[in-house]
Amino acid sequence: MHQVSYALQASLDLYSMVESFPKSPRRVRNLKEELSSLNFVLKSLRDILSSITEVDVSELILPLKECGKVCGRFQQEFTDPFRPDWDNLRFNRGSIDNFTQLLNGYKSTFKRAVGAGNIHRAGVTSETLESHIELLQTTIVDLVDLAGNIKHKSPAATRTEVEPTNATGIPLENEDMSLEILSVHRCLHFCGQLIDHVRTKPKLMSGGSMRLIELSPSYQMATKDNNTEGPSTIVNTTTRGVPQFFVSTNRNAINGVNRGDGRQLQVAGYLSDESL
């Protein structure tokens, strides 16, 4: 998968540049640590994908591409690589901390893909599966927070110059932020798919371990009324640990009843058809 190699090389290049500044603020050191961790995860993902085919990572094509692109573009923000202005360094209307959070979101998603691959390569215990699901739930919460932070980035108050635009007249910076949000949504969808993948019918093996042999849908029952003009009414029953997403695309309200066992994660909101 060439997108993995592309993201890895861009991350390695940016890490090398950041590492060349030994006396840097804490937030820059945090960025360096995040890049180092991202490099390790991308290498692991490359190795996993070269040996197994059971995990569908097609949803990661855009996140991998965006991960590599933002690393390259962030490196270009260094107008003076010998004396960087850390305090005023901005990227897509965000700070270094925002950029580090974005990389963390990508890394966490890629790491969950590596975990899913390891589950397929070796027998695992039921405790391991539950731990993997909890990690996926945590990643989903972090990704939702990340998407919100991207959407709430405010333009620089002192900006007076004319912003460059694309062929349709949309500012390039806005276009880049839209791609960031879309890539994070792909990460969310991928993590939801992984939970569906892990929630399978296991076959017990020797030593109390198990392998995943059959997929079963986690979203067991969902019904909605046919009144498209009024509120949507949803009755949803899920298995334990499955994240629930309730999204309105027509700005109508959602009325719902949720039933499930154990810990649950629920996210609700509005997205336009274009965003989906």
Image: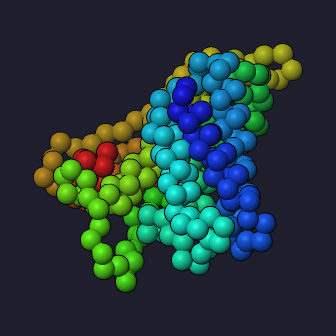
Name of the residue lying farthest toward the bottom? 158
Residue 38 placement (x, y as % from top left): 67, 47
Q: Specify the color scheme.
A: rainbow
Residue 28 placement (x, y as % from top left): 68, 67
Image quadrant in which the N terminus is located: top right
Is residue 223 placed above or below 159 in the rendered structure?
A: above
Is residue 155 placed above or below 273 in the rendered structure?
A: below
Question: At 75% from the left edge and 36% from the top edge, which residue is drawn?
Answer: 128
Left or right relative to 240: residue 271: left
Question: At 68% from the left edge and 59% from the top edge, which residue is drawn?
Answer: 18
Left or right relative to 251: residue 172: right
**Residue 93 can be seen, yes or no:** yes
Left or right relative to 95: residue 12: right
The one nearer the camera, 99 or 115, is 99
For the image shown, how many numbered marks are present on the structure?
Answer: 0
The one nearer the camera, 18 or 181, is 18
**Residue 193 can be seen, yes or no:** no
Image quadrant in which the C terminus is located: top left
Question: At 64% from the left edge and 47% from the top edge, which residue is drawn?
Answer: 13
Residue 96 placement (x, y as % from top left): 58, 67
Is residue 40 placed above or below 125 in the rendered structure?
A: below
Residue 24 placement (x, y as % from top left): 73, 71
The one nearer the camera, 121 or 177, is 177
Question: At 52% from the left edge and 58% from the top edge, which residue is drawn?
Answer: 76
Q: Quadrant of residue 33?
A: bottom right
Name of the residue lying farthest toward the left? 229
